[in-house]
Amino acid sequence: MSKRSEKIAETIHEGICAVLSRGLNDPRIGFVTIVDVELNDDLTLAKIFYTVIGDEKTRRESEKGLNSARGYIRRELGKMLTMRYIPEILFRYDSSQEYGNRIDSILKEIGKSDDGDDRENNS
């Protein structure tokens, strides 16, 4: 990614976080955290990666709320960005944190079973 697109992605990230912190009038949107912003090469599309605290239902409802607020969020970004064309916005759920948590729990389970094996072998 070029320096310009990195700077724009950072500004979009900050802008969306500001809009979310002020609150959207949509009860479906839960506690959303913006994880990353990726821009395509011609800066016409921004993929916004987010996570949500809660269960699968909360995630789906938040996704619906974010998608319905895309136009509003894009207009708000237009006020912050000094660009002629504001990128289209796509929200994508970032499951990497869940994946990492799952791996962490598996490793902890392996660690527990290894500790039990050591005690049995030393007796």
Image (cartoon, helix red, strand yellow):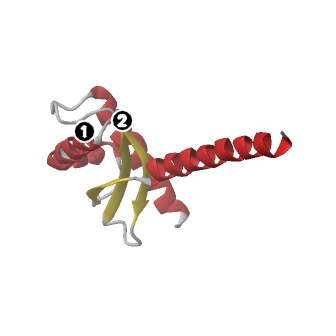
**Residue 53, disc:** 2
- Left-right relation of 45 to 113: left
- Do the CB atoms of the residues marked 1 and 2 lie less than 8 Å apart? yes
Q: Position of residue 117 (x, y in %)?
A: 73, 46
Q: Residue furthest bottom?
A: 41
Q: Compare marks 1 and 2 and give the one earlier in the sequence.
A: 2
Q: CA distance from mark 1 to mark 2?
A: 8 Å
**Which residue occupies 70% across, 41% down?**
116
Q: Position of residue 24 (x, y in %)?
A: 21, 32
Provide the secondary structure element on which disc 2 rests: loop
Residue 39 found in image quarter: bottom left
- Left-right relation of 118 to 98: right
**Which residue occupies 62% across, 43% down?**
108
Q: Position of residue 35 (x, y in %)?
A: 44, 47
Q: Residues within 10 Å of mark 2 (few under 14, many from 20)?
A: few
Q: Amino acid at mark 1?
A: Thr
Name the one closer to the observer, 84 or 27.
27
**Residue 68, disc:** none
For label 1, the residue is 58
Name the one closer to the observer, 39 or 27.
27
